[in-house]
Amino acid sequence: AQTVTQSQPEMSVQEAETVTLSCTYDTSENNYYLFWYKQPPSRQMILVIRQEAYKQQNATENRFSVNFQKAAKSFSLKISDSQLGDTAMYFCAFMKHDFPQAGTALIFGKGTTLSVSS
Amino acid sequence: DGGITQSPKYLFRKEGQNVTLSCEQNLNHDAMYWYRQDPGQGLRLIYYSQIVNDFQKGDIAEGYSVSREKKESFPLTVTSAQKNPTAFYLCASSTGRQAMNYGYTFGSGTRLTVV
C-alpha cells in the first residue's frame, strides 16, 4: 500500500520570502502522479501543481515549483515570493497510474498548515 | 457551470441517528469519491465508485454506506454504527485521463456535527 508523509504540521513565513514544504511517499509502483493541493480557510480544495513520475523535469507553476527526487521518494513544494493569500493547509497526494480506470484513489498526507504574515 | 454540489453545508445529527450527505456532479465524470477530513489526519478515503451501481470500500468504510444509482449522484449515509462521525466530509469526482492531469474536482464539503 502507498503512504504519504508530511513531516511539518505547521510552518510560518514572512511575505515575499521563500518556503519549502516537505513530502515523502512510499510505493512499489514505477509509474504514478504526485500532486500538491491547497485548502484555504474556505476549505475548498485547489490543485497547486502536479508531477508525473516518469518525467525528470521538475514541475513549475508561476511562484510554485517542486523538487522531485524519485529515488529518494521525495516531493517537496517551494513557494517563492510568499503572499498573504498563500495562507492555507497544503496537502501532498499520490495517485498510481491506472489509466483507463476512472476511479484511481488519491492518497493524501496529513497536511502542513502554512501561515504567511506581513 | 459544471461542478460538484454538496449539501447541506452544515449538518447536525443526534446520537443514534442515520444521516445522508448529498453529492451531485454535472461534469459527466465516471468516478466519484468520499473523503473524511479530521484535524491532523489529512483526507481519508471512505468509499469510491468507478461506475454506476458499483462501489468499493476505502480505508475507513466502517459505519458508512453509499449508493450509486445515477452517474450524477453519490450520496453518503453516516449510520449510527459510526462511533465518531463529527468531521468534515468532502466529495470528489474524476475521469481517468482528467484524474492523471488534474487530480480530482472537489465539492465544497459538509461539516457534520453530532449533538
Image (cartoon, coloured by chain):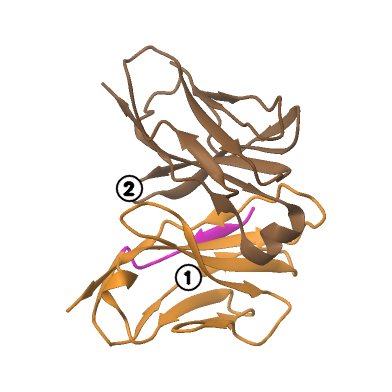
Chain colours: A orange, B brown
Name the quarter where the C terminus of chain A is drawn.
bottom left
Tell which of A29 and A81 is nearer to you.
A81
Q: Secondary structure at mark 1?
A: loop
The percent position of residue B20, horizontal first and vertical second, equals 49, 22
Residue depicted at 30% across the width and 68% down the height = A87
Q: Is residue A15 left or right of residue A26?
A: left
Q: Is residue A3 above or below residue B92?
A: below
**Residue B51: in magenta span:** no
Q: Is residue B80 above or below residue A107?
A: above
Residue for badge 1: A23
Residue B23: numbered disc: none
Q: Is residue B69 left or right of residue B75?
A: right
Query: Spatial distance from mark 1 to mark 2, Cα to Cα?
Result: 18 Å
Magenta span: helix, strand or loop, mainly? Answer: loop
Tell which of B32 and A19 is nearer to you.
B32
Check the residue under mark 2 and report the chain it is in: B
Residue B50 falls in image quadrant: top right
The segment highlighted magenta reads A1-9
Residue for badge 2: B39
- Of all residues, the one furthest to the front in this rendering is B1
Other residues around mark 1 within 10 Å, as few (<14) / some (14–19) / many (≥20)? many
Amino acid type assigned to the residue bearing label 2 in the image: Pro
Q: Is residue A56 above or below residue B110?
A: below
